Image (cartoon, helix red, strand yellow):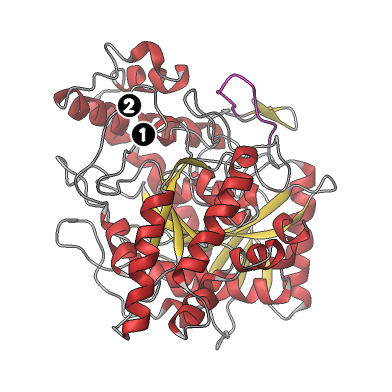
Amino acid sequence: MTSADDATQLCFLPATELAQRIRRRDLSPVEVTEAYLRRIEARNPVVNAYTLVLGDEAMDAARVAEKEVMAGVPLGPLHGVPVGIKDLDDVAGVPTSMASRAVMNRVPKTSAAAVERLLDAGAIVLGKTNTPEFGHKGITDNLRFGPTSTPFAIGYNSGGSSGGSAAAVADGMAALAQGTDGGGSVRIPASFSGTVGFKPSFGRIPSVTRPDGFLWGHPLVHIGPLARTVADAALMTGIMAGPHSRDPLSLPDDGVDYVAAAGEQTRPLRVAYSPRLGNFPVDPQVASVIAAAVETMRDNGIAVDEVELDFKADHKELAALWVRTISIHYAAIAVYWKQEGIDLMGEHAAVLTPQFLAMLEGAYKVSAVEHALDGLLRTGVHDGLENVFETHDLIVSPTLAIPPVKNATDGNTIGPTSINGEAVDPLIGWCMTYPINYTGHPAISVPAGLTPQGLPVGLQIIGRRHADESVLAMAAQFERIQPWFQNYPGLAR
């Protein structure tokens, strides 16, 4: 029988190694899945990463996976590897809660496109991971399941909206986890939870939405991996990426081997450093960790120039733009759901998070012309990035302006209302991630270090449009010169 220490070590194996050892028959999918389920049983009551654990289903899938290994049939790149799926995304036959008290009995018949690709690759779904209601803010807490903690400091938030996925990976409760990123929802929890979170270029990973196939009709919501290493994130990206006939906005196959891109860097990349990503106020502890990370890059031969980044708009204007934009999409979803019998703004309004209900109601105050004119603000962000990319390959900045915040006790944790005395929107204004959702550029958050209190801080790396491989290459290079894996709290325990 596997000892407790051995099981813990197994749960922290990189997914790339785990998949290889299963293919070599060094490890059994049943043994691996059992270890992860025991880890979840021990740790999820503390961290609250999962809203639903599919123990029986996962073990059934593991037994099938083991038989396939022993039979010598062709195996997918994630064969037998346990993963978590964000509870905003569908797994066929499994309830999707949206972390909402208004959505109690919705069981989809089909899986989301990215989830289907993970299953086709042989992944074993351990369960659904926690998120704010409908993913509407950068904090994972809700009135139905409560907050998720970063494993680095229980009682401090994991970040959102893919916070359950990030915390599960960071605490050894999933080898990999899927997330969505509409304003930073992969990168935000990666920063708070000390993991790697990658937002590929818009359309790189398809999203099949119905009844409206153009629901995210311009760069905003992306799908991406959460992982403990850059190579693991690259592996998962390659599996989920590629065109889909039912997603009219999906990108064609770019022919990139993402795992190879995360290997040794073959050409020097010139990096621009924006300490405030324009004019965001940044907590001094975060600024100090990021400045040290940038110096480490320079000390290891990476050319880094500090630059002025001008988005032609104040961060407050850009945060208000995000709230308006996402609110309009949420209001459209509410209309579709009402046709299915779930009336979010009617009979269920009383059980919604107050801020989420306000977003739904606020959407109706924005005219079509005003919504169209918001493209001017988005253009300013795009041009600001492209001005820098004329001379540099990548831009680095803090992922977030703050370290993790303490969890509230009422199911409605939010971020700060001010930083360094400057007002910010508590839902998203402290997230230095959402401007990149306006443009569709690829971006990743990698662990940069810890504050004196032991709280994780993420470094954001932004690439040129569609240059996903450059982002992965630099992230992997930084990971090599400043290793992080040994910092995961579960290994220390």
Q: Amino acid at mark 1?
A: Ser
Q: Residue furthest front?
A: 1
Q: Amino acid at mark 2?
A: Met
Residue 48 visible, this orientation: yes
Label tally: 2
Q: Which mark is residue 466?
A: none
Percent position of residue 82, x then y: 46, 62
Hey, which quadrant is residue 269 in on the image? bottom right
**Which residue carries the number 2 mark?**
104
Mark 2 falls on what kind of element? loop
Q: Is residue 166 magenta?
A: no
Percent position of residue 131, x then y: 47, 38
Asked if disc 2 and disc 1 are in contact, CB closer than 8 Å, the reply is yes
**Which residue carries the number 1 mark?**
97
Residue 468 visible, this orientation: no
Residue drawn at (26%, 65%) of the image = 251
Going from N to C along the chain, the mark reached first, 2 or 1, is 1
What is the magenta range?
405-414
- Horizontal side, residue 365 vs residue 482: left or right: left
Q: Quadrant of the N terminus?
A: bottom right
- Residues 281 and 252: in front is 252
Give the Cα separation between the discs numbered 2 and 1: 6 Å
- Horizontal side, residue 29 vs residue 272: left or right: left
Residue drawn at (37%, 34%) of the image = 98
